Amino acid sequence: MASQRTLCHSVLERLAKAGVLEDLVLIGSWCLEGYKSYFGRKTPLTILRTRDIDFLVPRPTRLRTSVDVPALLEELGFVTDFHRGGYIRLLHPELIVEFLVPERGRGTDHPVRLPQLGINAQALRFLNMLEENTITATLEGVRVRMPHPAAFALHKLLIAPRRQGRPSKQAKDLDAAVAVLEALRVHGAIELVREHLASMPPRWRARIRQVLGTRQELREWLALLYGS
Amino acid sequence: MARVIRHVLHEELVNSRRMQRRYAQALRGLGRGSLVRKLIGGHPYYYLAAREGARVRFRYLGKLSVPERQERLAKHRKRGQYRRLLREVKQQIRFLERSLCG
């Protein structure tokens, strides 16, 4: 685990030195590590996570500098993996770096080319809500942009039902959402979650309501967020 | 919870197997052999030493310029790094397979 953290630090530091980190948003389960510094170390925020470290590239892409990310990370031992979907992942035994972009319109199966970063990224639905509400927190000693915890938790609730045929992934999403919501409640920020929820499109709100209503352990959040 | 852990382990096993293929591919792309310097008549000449079955064969490269030497040494270092990482991946695969089958 120590070498994974060291490698994570090296990846973030390299991206920061290359001048692209400030234009990226860290998403996925590594955010929980950053939220520990945001909420304070005593907040229990532990979930099961894989080696993936995901970066969101906001759209329209306004990167201040261009950098060949695969070449930048090759020195650390990363190898480039072309996924059959056409997008690129950078693999290392301790960490898998992936780049994502928000999906637009009707969506497409094709990867999105990002020549400024020398990669192809995967487009996924609902990611725009993560890029719109961000905070800056410290992860492995590096300042990183990541979604506001409220946006992170609501996004996890929103995408959980889309994990059809992958119940374990769905359970992981819901665990992460509940862990972050709990941390927000401990810090008296439930009103903030309600505000985030209110700013979402009605169909998304309805979907989150449905998710909260389906599981016994999530029902208390239904009452807290929707007052029912 | 057990099912979630099992799923995560399976996902990691798939990732590690993919990683193993990628490192093996990258290693093939870097070629084989180590750069050896021999001083003959006071002049340095370079050879590529590579194992062929039971014996080590030296292929004559001649006098190499500094950039050529640096390029070969960089490749050599990269091969060492990838071999170490490939070993790590193989260990992970063994661990994950044991965890999922046990």
Image (cartoon, grey):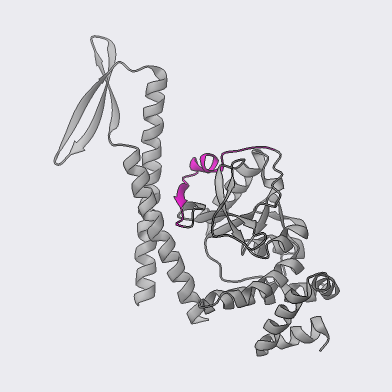
* Front-lying residue, B52 or A165: A165
Residue B34, image x and y in percent? 29, 32
Left or right: A16 as drawn, with respect to A164: right
Q: Magenta stretch containing residue A70, yes or no?
A: yes
Q: Residue at x 74, y 67 (%)?
A: A151
Give the quadrant of residue B45. top left
Query: Is A43 left or right of B14, judged from the image as shown?
Result: right
Q: Height in image: A176 above or below A119?
A: below
Q: Residue at x 69, y 42 (%)?
A: A63
Estimate the x, y position of residue A143 in percent, counting from the top left.
Answer: 71, 50
Residue sticking out furthest to the left: B54
For the record, the magenta segment spans A65-84
Q: Nearer the viewer, residue A67 or B39?
A: A67
Q: Quadrant of residue A154?
A: bottom right
| Relative side of B78 to B37, left or right | right
**Can you give x and y, in whole percent of width and height, for residue A9 in the image?**
60, 49
Q: Position of residue B30 (x, y in %)?
A: 35, 37
Q: Quadrant of the C terminus of chain A?
A: bottom right
Q: Vertically, is B44 above or below A23?
A: above
Q: Pick whichever, A41 or A208, lies toward us.
A: A208
**Residue at the front extreme of this rendering:** A106
